[in-house]
Amino acid sequence: GSEEKSELAQAHGCDHTIVYTKENFVDRVKDITKGAGVPVVYDSVGKDTLLDSIECLAPRGILVNFGQSSGKLENFDLGALAKGSFYVTRPSLMTYTASRTDLETSANTLFDLVLNNRITIPINNRYELKDAAQAHQDLEGRRTTGTTLFTLLFFE
């Protein structure tokens, strides 16, 4: 969505970045993959990108939509999936952690990865609780990256 986010992705090891607000990402994906498309697209934007994200998929590819920052896609035609036998999913953390066992397994897996330095969690945004409205505006305006934390100050 921005040059800053593109640079951040590159700094974290991304080989190819595309600023979808400045260039046609379908054409770039087709160019990068020599027309083959990609096996998976993770789309957090929604309405503005979802249909084009499908165009980036290789046959039998999977579109994972996990957000709708640009709005909800209306009147989606399932027939668009037939062209490449595509799959679409809209995962929710609540489904994957619905049982206590699933929640503990997920948490233990995450903590193990962090403690063993397999992944890092950058904390790029901190807000005092009194600034919650600004934090929500920044999240909704897609002006945040990484993890966003609220901090509480306790006084004795």
Image: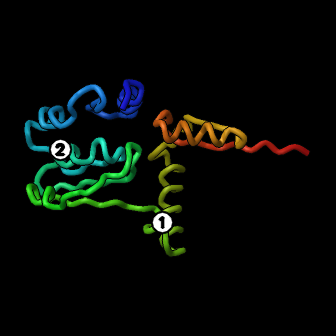
Q: Are marks 2 and 1 in contact (CB under 8 Å)?
A: no
Residue 17 point in image, percent of width and height: 29, 31
x 74%, y 44%: residue: 152
Relative to 81, say whether 50 is above or below: above
Identify the disc placed on residue 94.
Answer: 1
Which image quadrant for residue 77? bottom left
Q: Would you call the spot at circle 1 few (<14 residues within 10 Å), some (14-19), or many (20 or more)? A: few
Identify the disc placed on residue 151.
Answer: none
For numbered disc 2, what is the local secondary structure? Answer: loop
- Which residue is outermost to the right? 156
x 41%, y 44%: residue: 69
The amino acid pointed to by label 1 is Met
- Image quarter in which the C terminus is found: top right
x 49%, y 56%: residue: 110
The amino acid pointed to by label 2 is Cys
Residue 7 point in image, percent of width and height: 38, 26
x 15%, y 58%: residue: 81
- Image quarter in which the N terminus is found: top left
* CA distance for labels 2 and 1: 28 Å
Question: 6 or 131, which lies in front?
Answer: 131
Question: 75 or 78, which lies in front?
Answer: 75
For numbered disc 1, what is the local secondary structure? Answer: helix
Q: How is the image coloured?
A: rainbow
Residue 47 point in image, percent of width and height: 31, 46
Residue 149 point in image, percent of width and height: 61, 43
> Upstream in the sequence, badge 2 or badge 1?
2
Which image quadrant for residue 56? top left
Disc 2 marks which residue? 56
